[in-house]
Amino acid sequence: KVGGSAYAWSKLGMSFVTLSLAGELADDDIGCNSFWPVTAIDTRATRYFGMGTEDDWRTPEIVADTVLEILNRDPATFTGNAVYDEDFLVAAGVEDFSKYNLTEGDPAPMSAQMFDPSYERPE
């Protein structure tokens, strides 16, 4: 896909920054983690660049809930992780993702499948 390499390098860079900061800040009990959205998030960018339709996106609230759940973890033990938002929230007990949908039905996991074509949502 055209333009995919720049996005891939930015994700790789973010992963390395997460790992580096987690190591540097471990003695200060500061956790450093990152997460990747399983679907595209409804933002000005997704709309402006025509990255699908509302059927393909989740609301920004899934980002906020993921960040809050990460912040509720003990930074001494939960650090240096890169997680998918939906997988992480499922593990935290979220069962109904419909509140994050812009339209009926769950959007396809296009963002996750961009770099992992075999990605499937956990059951």
Image (cartoon, rainbow, N blue to C red):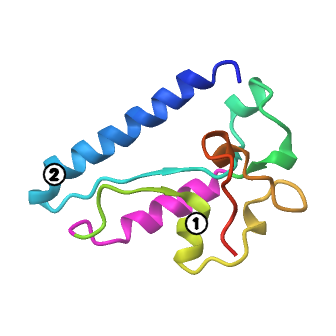
Q: Nearer the viewer, residue 11 or 32?
A: 11
What is the residue that sits farthest to the top in this orientation? 2
Closer mark to the observer between disc 1 and disc 2: 1
Q: From what the image shows, is residue 78 above or below residue 83?
A: below
Give the amino acid type for the residue marked by disc 2 in the picture: Leu
Magenta span: predominant SS is helix
The residue positioned 69% from the left and 60% from the top of the image is 120
Write the start and end of the magenta stretch as one range: 60-76
CB-based contact (under 8 Å), mark 1 and mark 2? no
Q: Verify whether residue 47 appears in magenta.
A: no
The residue positioned 56% from the left and 69% from the top of the image is 89
In the image, 57: left or right of 67?
A: right
Q: Residue 6 falls in which quadrant of the image?
A: top right
Mark 1 nearby-residue class (10 Å; few <14, some 14–19, many ≥20):
some
Secondary structure beneath dot 2 equals helix
The residue positioned 32% from the left and 39% from the top of the image is 16
The residue positioned 47% from the left and 36% from the top of the image is 11
Q: Residue 26: where, in percent of width, then height?
A: 15, 57
What is the residue that sits farthest to the right in this orientation? 104
Residue position marked by numbered label 1 in the rendering? 87
Q: Residue 14: where, in percent of width, then height?
A: 39, 37
Q: From what the image shows, is residue 112 above or below residue 16?
A: below
Q: From what the image shows, is residue 85 above or below residue 18?
A: below
Secondary structure beneath dot 1 equals helix
What is the residue that sits farthest to the left in this orientation? 27
Residue position marked by numbered label 2 in the rendering? 25
Give the amino acid type for the residue marked by disc 1 in the picture: Asp
